Image (cartoon, rainbow, N blue to C red):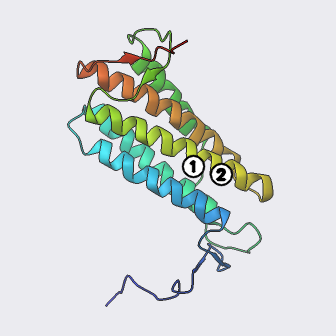
Amino acid sequence: MFKIYTRTGDKGQTSLIGGTRVPKFHPRIEAYGTIDELNSYIGLIRDHEIGTRYKEILLEIQDRLFTAESLIALDPEAEVTIKLPKIADADIILLEQEIDRMNEDLPELKSFILPGGHPIVSYCHIARCVCRRAERHTIRLAQAQPVEEKVIQYLNRLSDYLFVLARRLGKDLEANEIAWKART
């Protein structure tokens, strides 16, 4: 019987792809762990009553996020013989096309908007914030060790996608979009 627990992490270490043991707070673990958190929030969004097209794109995004996690979990100094999937230009282009499609009839933004208006809109904003944090962790990691450049590009575009998805779903659900008015 396969057991989910291994006990190998009981002393605060885990393995990268390639076998290198690192602390569980290692920058690679922080980066791919945050992407994993993001993936869970996207699953939460997908589990709501939203259009089929949104669900299909979110499922594709979840797949790409697992790819991003595996690329970050790879020890750049280890000799690894397994072939990992990649993030492609087409993955980034898909996000851009979806952003443009969703944005076509949204009102022009003239100020920041306050997250909220409907639970699904709020979940999209939470996912956007987690995505930005994942991007920051990944960029920080890239300052010290090699990171696949497309992963950073994908996360950057994904946060834009999640922002527009929040607005699009808000409009679809007739949620109130509240503009932020700075007190001066």
Left or right: 10 as drawn, with respect to 140: left
Please, is residue 111 above or below residue 63 in the view? above
Residue at x-position 52% and y-position 30%: 160
In three-dimensional space, the C-alpha distance between marks 1 and 2, rounded to whole angstroms, equals 6 Å
The quarter of the rendered structure image containing the C terminus is: top right
Foreground of the two, 104 or 27: 27
* Other-residue count near label 2 (Cα within 10 Å), few / some / many at <14 / 14–19 / ≥20: many
Q: Residue 82: x percent and y percent? A: 61, 71
Q: Residue 12: x percent and y percent? A: 57, 80
Q: Are marks 1 and 2 in contact (CB under 8 Å)?
A: yes
Image mark for residue 134: 1
Residue at x-position 79% and y-position 58%: 144
Q: Residue 56: x percent and y percent? A: 33, 39
Foreground of the two, 71 or 158: 158
> What element does badge 2 sit on?
helix
Residue at x-position 77% and y-position 71%: 77
Amino acid, disc 1:
Ala
Quarter holding residue 4: bottom left
Amino acid, disc 2:
Thr
Foreground of the two, 134 or 73: 134
Image mark for residue 34: none
Q: Residue 63: x percent and y percent? A: 44, 51
Residue under numbered circle 2: 138
Asked if one can make out residue 118 in the rendered structure from this viewpoint, the answer is yes
Residue at x-position 47% and y-position 14%: 181
The quarter of the rendered structure image containing the N terminus is: bottom left
